[in-house]
Image (cartoon, grey):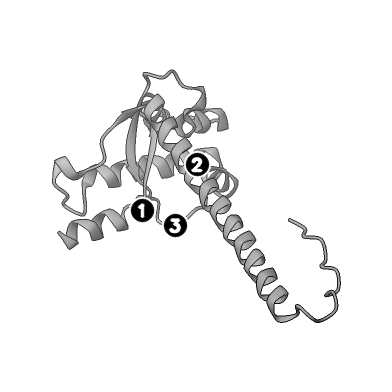
Amino acid sequence: MAAVEDIAESQDIFYVCKKTLETVKEQLKKGEDIKEATVNELTFPENLADEEIMVPVDMRGVGEDFDDVEQMVEKLGPKGTAEAFVKAAEYFDANKDNEKEEDRPKPMTASEWRQVLEEDDCLEDGEEEFLEGEEEELDDLDEGVEEEEGAEAEEPAAKKAKTA
């Protein structure tokens, strides 16, 4: 079981629009130029119809790490980014980890992918809020200790206002 978990940990799965991926493959075969709008259609589900199919690609096939699609376009240009996603799709399809078919990421609709992305954003926001809440609790605890220690002492100097 640990081997399956290791495989899942090592994957770098991203979802792209299946129809646009097919279009990009054809354009690249013909040597046509790829526009940034096409890359956006490929990678950003916000403007796609809910029922549009998104397919998984493994970004390890790109050969280098990028923080996001914008960074890829900046470094590789629209055509290079499109080529990178085609390589990522080929890498996923090659199944170099020899995963069982039932364990592999499955295609989903654009609506489902947007939901996954929203949940990821909510988790990240929630973590930040959680950490801020912990800081406030620690400040409250510190103040309580100061009050106990310095019950007879003079008022402590005014604290600086917090800046976020």
Quarter where residue 111 is shown: top left
Residue 133 pos. (x, y %): 59, 55
**Which residue is rendered at x = 83% and y = 66% of the image?**
160
Amino acid marked by disc 2? Cys
Check the picture and name the quadrant holding the N terminus.
Answer: bottom left
Instruction: Kindly identify which residue carries mark 2.
Output: 122
**Which residue is rendered at x = 69% and y = 76% of the image?**
148
Amino acid marked by disc 3? Glu
Where disc 1 sits, the SS reads helix
Where disc 2 sits, the SS reads helix
Instruction: Kindly identify which residue carries mark 1.
Output: 60
Residue 24 pos. (x, y %): 41, 30
Instruction: Kindly identify which residue carries mark 3.
Output: 64
Report, in whole angstroms, how far the alpha carbon at label 1 lies from the one at label 3: 7 Å
**Which residue is rendered at x = 23% and y = 57% of the image?**
5
Report, in whole angstroms, how far the alpha carbon at label 2 lies from the one at label 1: 26 Å
Report, in whole angstroms, how far the alpha carbon at label 3 lies from the one at label 2: 28 Å
The reply to whether residue 33 is in sight is: no
Where disc 3 sits, the SS reads loop
